[in-house]
Image: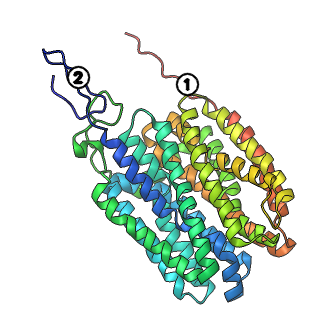
Amino acid sequence: MTQTSETAAVVEPPAGGRKPARARVHRAWFVAAVTFVTIIGAAAFRSVPGLFIDPLHEEFGWSRGTIGAAVSVNLALYGLTAPFAAALMDRYGIRRVVAVALTVIALGSGLTVWMTAAWQLMLCWGLLVGLGSGSMALAFAATVTNRWFTERRGLVTGILTAASASGQLIFLPVLSWIVDRHEWRPAAVTVALAALAVVPFVWLLLHDHPADVGQKPYGAKEFVPKPAPVPGAARRAVTVLFSAVRTGPFWLLAGTFAICGASTNGLIQTHFVPASHDHGMPITTAASLLAVIGVFDVVGTVASGWFTDRFDSRRLLAVYYALRGVSLLFLPLLLGPSVHPPMLFFIVFYGLDWVATVPPTLALCREHYGDDSPIVFGWVLASHQVGAAVVAFGGGVARDVFGSYDVVWYASGALCAAAALMALVIRKRPAAPLAVA
């Protein structure tokens, strides 16, 4: 028997009785590693909004509601672009779509240094970076996972999801230090350079399909030919949506994920730093706490992927949302000018839960929608970002109107309790009936 390129493929021992030789590490893990680094580079901009709210307010006099509106446009486009990006990857390939997306992110971030009006903020932060980052959304991770893996999908999903948190971990302390010492413009340039730096790795190392390198997907029993390019990317994305909206699981998944986005990207990522600053905490300290969330987010998301391969995804989601809601109800009591043990406990706890919802949500999409699951998940992610956009804008307005963020923390905690109940309502997909001879 000849040695294949599949991981764990074994060569028959020769007559002399030597031990069999194992194949080299499967190329799927290298593709996953490049995807991880790519998402980290794209995550640089995700660290910026909370750091820029106060500096932009002080320099231009824009209200927090106006700045929050620009962030909300970004978050909404991040979600709404994702299903079309997944379809574009089927049409033009992962490598081309991702390289263009990173370039658009760099362009949008770099142009902010010359802005003087609020509409330019909407154009750069909202439109350009929203479109670019949407093409780098979790639908990208779902596409890579579905093409390159048939085993360990939950674990790989958790690892790739954690890449966004890793980007936050890497960039938040650096960007907060730059903003504190050199104002916000050098930080925007740093984000642009980080996105551009990843493009060569994508172009050289990110293969579109296992068949491109003559391999099976990881864990597959048979070779999978590369499918022909799928024309009509936009039409396919919309067609899949129209099919999915006629099913109950889609609405429940979209609803829970909207609340997930509202309570993470829209709330904590956008407003935690200015809310902490309201209570006398230095911006660099608050940003460092967000970075710590990123540390434990990596742990929590990878662990969630491991749990998803072994336990009921519905129950996992219910537990995650319930615990998140309880933690948010206590947050107003914990904010202060300094870091104390209860606040550190919240940061660790919230970090473990931050995007632990992604692996079970993606697993449920895969369970109910099969080959269309990356696009369906893209639409579910769109609801996540719409929820985030609403709270990013509403949180800024609430701060302008009430003088604090307390009402937003309490409302988000109540929404998380509703999400926990919704997760338990999602039904299992009936097993396919056995064929009768």
Q: Amino acid at mark 1?
A: Pro
Q: Quadrant of residue 428?
A: top right
Colouring chosen for the image of the structure: rainbow
Task: From the viewer's side, name the closer residue of 223 and 351.
Answer: 351
At mark 2, the secondary structure is loop
Whether residue 33 can be seen here: yes
Residue 214: horizontal and vertical position, in percent? Answer: 22, 40
Task: From the viewer's side, name the closer residue of 430 and 274.
Answer: 274
Residue 385: horizontal and vertical position, in percent? Answer: 61, 58
Find residue 20 and name its label.
2
Residue 419: horizontal and vertical position, in percent? Answer: 72, 44
Q: Quadrant of the N terminus?
A: top left
Task: From the viewer's side, name the closer residue of 398 and 204.
Answer: 204
Q: Residue at position x 27%, y 47% from top?
A: 228
Q: Nearer the viewer, mark 1 or mark 2?
A: 2
Find residue 430 and name its label.
1
- 371 w.r.t. 379: above or below: above
Q: Residue at position x 63%, y 84% from top?
A: 118
At mark 1, the secondary structure is loop
Q: Residue at position x 60%, y 55% from top?
A: 294
